[in-house]
Image: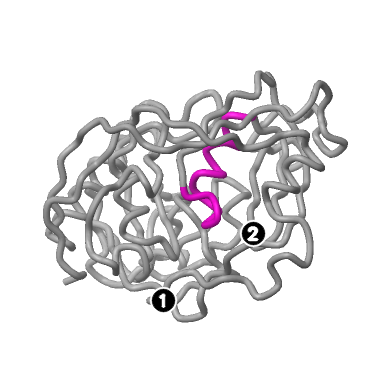
Amino acid sequence: MVALTSAIALAALATSAASGLRAAQLPPGAGQGQIRVSNRTASNRIWFQTASLMPSRPDAAPPGATLEVVAANGVTLREFIGFAYMNDKGALTRSQVIGGPEWTDTQRFDLIIPIPNNSPAGLTRDSDQIAVGGPAIPLLQQMLADHFQLRVHKEQRALPSLDLVRSGATAGPDLKPSTATCDPQDVAQRCDFRPGPGFITVRGMTMRHLAMQLSWNFPAVKLPVRDKSGLKGQYDYTLSFVPAFLTAPNPTNPDVANPAAGSGPSLPQALEQRLGLKLVETTDTFDVVVIDAVQPLK
């Protein structure tokens, strides 16, 4: 692992979906990665993203020197565990991480993992742009074990889940086939998924990617979501709704009920009215991770 100093800054995000991540100095000793208590709220929270470490001063490193990192802001320990123990379908959802004290769902953390120079990418993504592995994953598992004394085991269990299906014979008015090429070097052609409190803006993403994002990014959707829409290809859409929950200003508190809920379409209503999709309750067998032991951050 390459040692990093405070002269290295976080910048040059690889995906525009990470626009909430600002340039930030890495403190001394961060070469093996860092987990710290977050002060993030809903306005600047991001999920796992890849970025490049770049010299903050011309004399800090050779010209053009960079080092990839995987970073996250404002993520709970349960969500970290689900990401760290992903399978070939992607990260496990909150309901697939079993057990643990209450604070694993409330206190949020920031993460930086420098990736070894000889690794081609920190995260491996499939054709739907869903992370399914990569060198960052065993590093994250080790960091969780070191910082939280985390021990887990894997099982399969029958769990409630949701299927994303079409609500009618035709697509909703805001669901448009995409012409984006997803070239990350061309700003006009990049594909991304931008979620926030009360909105989703998407360019060039598949229905399977939407199902994964619904499982992860929205506290009102607490179950695994699987794409059963039958819709192939990539789509563009923008969705507005009134969220059922809001991220608490205090990062150690759980999400709070939105007092404005009911004043406009909910997320499920917007999915059906604007995209022609709906969530149907079902049950199936899923991989789960059971927390055997965990301690607060050292």
Q: For the residue labelled by badge 1, is the local secondary structure a helix, a strand or a loop? A: loop
User: Which residue is pictured at 81% across the width and 28% down the height?
Assistant: 171
* Horizontal arrangement in the rendering, residue 169 relative to residue 162 (left or right): right
Q: Which residue is mark 1?
A: 253
Between the C-alphas of marks 2 and 1, the distance is 19 Å
For the magenta stretch, what is the residue range? 207-222
Which of the pair 5/22 is nearer the observer? 22
- Seen in the picture, residue 222 relative to 162 is either above or below; the reply is below
Q: Is 76 displayed left or right of 208 in the figure?
A: left
Indicate yes or no whether the magenta region holds residue 118.
no
The residue positioned farthest toward the right in the image shown:
173
User: Which of the pair 198/159 is nearer the observer?
Assistant: 159
> Would residue 179 be seen by someone viewing this image from the given angle?
no
Q: Position of residue 130 (x, y in %)?
A: 49, 34
Q: Name which residue type carries label 2.
A: Gly
Q: Split into 4 quadrants, where in the image is the C terminus?
A: bottom left
